[in-house]
Amino acid sequence: MTPMTATRPILLLILAALPLSEGKVAERTAGEDEFPALQLLPPGSVVEGISLPRYEQHRVTALITAKKMMVISRREVRMNGIRSFLYAPDGGETTCVQLTEAKYDFRTKLMHSLAPPVALLHPRYTVRGSSVVFSNATHCGLVKGPVSTTFRLNADANVR
């Protein structure tokens, strides 16, 4: 048997396996409502020091950072030590949401706090409460009480 004819059976085995491999790769790609990397991590996986930016039209509009993230499924994670930064569209003021522990659903794009306290920090106000549900996509949410809010007025503003 020549070296060329000896490689033919190996080449045929490789070619025969290609459709199977292609199916496995398609299984592992992310769906529209899934985070692109979660299909590579099995449920229960823990990742430390994560950063999840949200982009719209080549601009970062939000950023979630967490000390730890545990994969629950391809669509849902549980995090602790969370800071979520919501950037103003005009590049102005940034709101920071601080959470002790929360779950995030990539399908609904909602963050649900799981443990108190929660805080929203903005240059013009601070809100502290026991829980929060919010969306990084819409920059909207609800703080549940008891809630305390502190407003900071601009020193140059005329107050009547």
Image (spheres, helix red, strand yellow):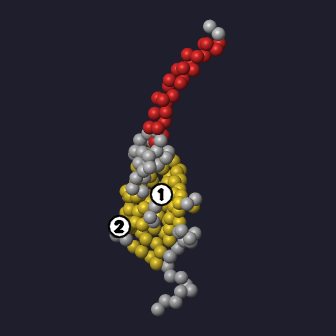
Can residue 78 be seen here? The reply is no
Quarter-wise, where is residue 44 in the image? top left
Q: What residue is shown with label 2?
A: 144
Farthest-out residue, bottom: 160
Question: What SS does tag 1 mark?
Answer: strand
6 left or right, relative to 21: right
Percent x, y of residue 143: 38, 67
The residue lying toward the viewer, choosing from 59 and 144, is 59
User: Pointer 1: residues within 10 angstroms few (<14), some, or many (20+)?
Assistant: many
Which percent across, then down, holds residue 135?
43, 61
Q: Position of residue 88 (x, y in %)?
A: 53, 69
Q: CA distance from mark 1 to mark 2?
A: 18 Å
In the rendered view, does 126 fall on the left or right side of 5?
left
Sequence-earlier tag: 1 or 2? 1
Q: Are marks 1 and 2 in contact (CB under 8 Å)?
A: no
- In this orientation, does residue 80 appear? yes
Residue sitting at x 53%, y 53% = 51
**Which SS class for mark 2?**
strand
Amino acid type of the residue tagged 1 in the rendering:
Ile
In the image, residue 13 above or below residue 24 = above
Q: Residue at x 37, y 64 (%)?
A: 130
Question: Callout 2: 10 Å neighbours few (<14), some, many (20+)?
Answer: few
Image height of 5 relative to 116, above or below? above
- The residue type indicated by label 2 comes to Lys
Give the labeled residue for mark 1: 82
Residue at x 51% of width, y 48% of height: 48
Q: Between 18 and 65, which is closer to the camera in this rendering?
A: 18
At x 53% / y 58%, what residue is drawn? 55
